[in-house]
Image: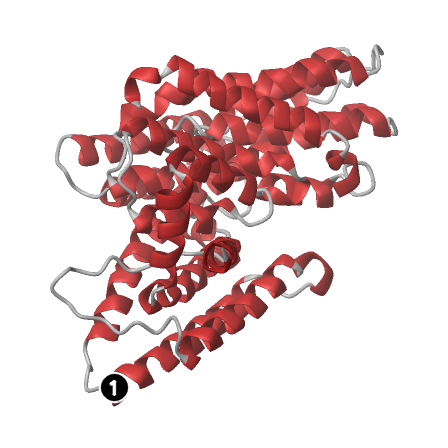
Amino acid sequence: MNRILASTLLAVLVFCLPAFAWATSSDMELLDLTRHGVGYAALGIFAVAYALVMAEEFTQLRKSKPVILAAGIIWAMIAVVYVNNGMTHEAEAAVRHNLLEYAELMLFLLVAMTYINAMEERRVFDALRSWLIRKGFSLRQLFWLTGILAFFISPVADNLTTALLMCAVVLAVGGDNTRFIGVACINIVVAANAGGAFSPFGDITTLMVWQKGVVDFWGFFALFVPSVVNFVVPAAIMHFAIPAEQPSASDEAVPMKRGARRIIGLFLLTIATAVAFHNFLHLPPVIGMLTGLSYLQFFGYYLKKTARYDDSVGNNGRMGEVVPFDVFNKVARAEWDTLLFFYGVVLCVGGLGFIGYLGLASEVMYTQWGATAANVAVGVLSAIVDNIPVMFAVLTMQPDMSTGQWLLVTLTAGVGGSLLSIGSAAGVALMGQARGKYTFFGHLKWTPVIALGYAASIGTHMWFNAELF
């Protein structure tokens, strides 16, 4: 009994830490450091680092700093033990493998962020926001419209950008109506997270699953109906909490800058390139994304060279910029703190996995609990811990699961973060953007309703995609 309890506590501890391990080959003998002082010290160091990450809102210490420092310390301790045992290459090989995994993810995200920044600079999102405000929708219509748009935009753009865009609309129309803004923001968070769950590009977790080759590109769309259920069930209940009022419309019109529509087209072409490289050429998707970055670079060159010509003929003020389009400014504006945070996560928990803790967690969750219970628990944990490290853990455990179970954990990790406002990047960002109107406790009030949608989406997946289990 004590052994089972200890194993369960260990599994929860490891999953409450971002966990990503190196998949070692069977012919390489590694040291089991799970009961060694270095193993305990590594757990402690990472627990402190992750506590600082979770307290970022209060300490104003960027989340990348503690995990990068912890990564260096953990691997230094591991290396000392291995060198003292005459094993000088094992730790090096593990670190190189982790760096390769990180490089693929980081470069993929960097291209996507660059395109999003380019569209933002061309005022694509501002134009969409002004259009919504000008239409004069009622509060209930706006509640549904922002939710639906968040659901369908997040599979292409990241859920953070999507949520911020829709929240800007809600704040502009809602004014001092705190009740409407709070409920609408909850709906946006749920919709953005649900929309990202059925697309390989919709969330970093789905991207990782696709890049790992566990589920093919088209396989993710089997989650479309469960994702719709996850969004619609709580939205239908929250609908009745929205005041039946008609806000005043605005006459503000924001035109997009020259080249905006073509950049949107190039982004879609870049996604198609990444899919083609992976599906038909069997190359990593990141190669296709980097190829797509060159599309934007060449188009930026064209905008720069033709800027004076367009100014001379006149373009209704849509070009006329003092500084021409520069793609490297868009690269520089990427979320580097987030990208470096991923580095710290990969290296830190790669060390924990190399020590042996991830194997223990896998034994408890996927052998003792069973795949379905474990995958549902993953979603609940992702409401407390960022879903990215949790998915890292599952992918590197490589449990023997059916496609249906892999899709289940993809779904739960993607939408589980909606249960709490701190469970996803979208929720955390909106608490800052709508400070005082969308709060942790305001979201917590609706958690039972969101949990109902969470359970309904799981049931829908297990029924609708029963042949995949």
> Secondary structure under badge 1?
helix
Q: Residues within 10 Å of mark 1 (few under 14, many from 20)?
A: few
Q: Nearer the viewer, residue 255 or 279?
A: 279
Judged from this view, the residue extending furthest toward the bottom is 84
**Up/down of 32 relative to 236, above or below:** below
Q: Amino acid at mark 1?
A: Val
Q: Nearer the viewer, residue 181 or 313?
A: 181
- 459 vs 383, left or right, is left
**Up/down of 420 relative to 403, above or below:** below
Judged from this view, the residue extending furthest toward the right is 176
Residue 136 spot, x, y in % from top left = 75, 12
- 194 vs 362, left or right, is right
Can residue 444 be seen here? The reply is: yes
**Up/down of 36 relative to 369, above or below:** below
- 186 vs 248, left or right, is left
| The quarter of the displayed image where residue 174 is located | top right
| Residue that badge 1 annotates | 83
**Up/down of 230 relative to 52, above or below:** above
Residue 27 spot, x, y in % from top left = 11, 64
Please name the residue shown 52% across and 57% down the image. Answer: 9
Judged from this view, the residue extending furthest toward the front is 1
Please name the residue shown 77% across and 30% down the image. Answer: 182
Color scheme of the displayed model: secondary structure
Q: Nearer the viewer, residue 185 or 258?
A: 185
Residue 410 spot, x, y in % from top left = 41, 34
Please name the residue shown 62% across and 21% down the image. Answer: 147
Residue 212 spot, x, y in % from top left = 27, 43
The quadrant in which the C terminus is found is: top left
